Amino acid sequence: MIVTPTDTPLVQKMGLDGSAMPMKPMPVEQCVGEGLDGLNRNRMIIMPGLFFRIMNRLVPHGLVRAMTGNMMRKSTTFVS
């Protein structure tokens, strides 16, 4: 399973502010539900969230890494 940003206590522990993120973290229930559904359908790769699946196909991986780093810099209290 490919993990997408999920609204868990880890978000707060890392010092991230979910409300400041341009892409809001996915609810845990949605992530788990889509993950279990994929397992039930014998999928080898599961990526919860339609938006994240589309982005994974269309946006170059280098740009995704840069966007993720920028998002984390803007929404965290301990990374400058």
Image (tube, rainbow, N blue to C red):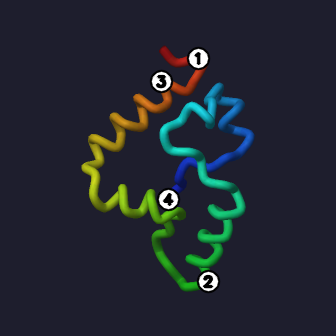
* Label 2: few (<14), some (14–19) or many (≥20) C-alpha neighbours in 10 Å: few
The residue under label 4 is 2
* Label 1: few (<14), some (14–19) or many (≥20) C-alpha neighbours in 10 Å: few
- Residue 57 location in percent, x, y? 31, 61
Of discs 3 and 4, which sits in the foreground?
3
Which mark, by number, is residue 73?
3
Residue 56 against residue 9 in the figure, above or below: below
Q: Residue sitting at 67 percent across and 55 percent down?
A: 27
Q: Secondary structure at mark 4?
A: loop
- Amino acid type, label 2: Asn
Of the image marks 1 and 4, the number of the one nearer the N terminus: 4
- Residue 75 location in percent, x, y? 55, 27
As drawn, the residue found furthest toward the top would be 80
- Amino acid type, label 1: Phe
Q: Residue sitting at 63 percent across and 62 percent down?
A: 31
Within the image, what quadrant is residue 37 found in? bottom right
Of the image marks 2 and 4, the number of the one nearer the N terminus: 4
The residues tagged by marks 3 and 1 sit, at their Cα atoms, a distance apart of 8 Å
- Residue 7 location in percent, x, y? 67, 47
- Amino acid type, label 4: Ile
Of the image marks 1 and 2, the number of the one nearer the N terminus: 2
Marks 3 and 4 in Cβ contact (< 8 Å): no
The residues tagged by marks 3 and 2 sit, at their Cα atoms, a distance apart of 37 Å
Q: Secondary structure at mark 1?
A: loop
As drawn, the residue found furthest toward the bottom would be 41
As drawn, the residue found furthest toward the right would be 9
Residue 63 against residue 15 in the figure, above or below: below
The residue under label 2 is 40
- Amino acid type, label 3: Arg
The residue under label 1 is 78
Which mark, by number, is residue 29?
none
Of residue 41 and residue 6, the one placed in the foreground of this image is 6
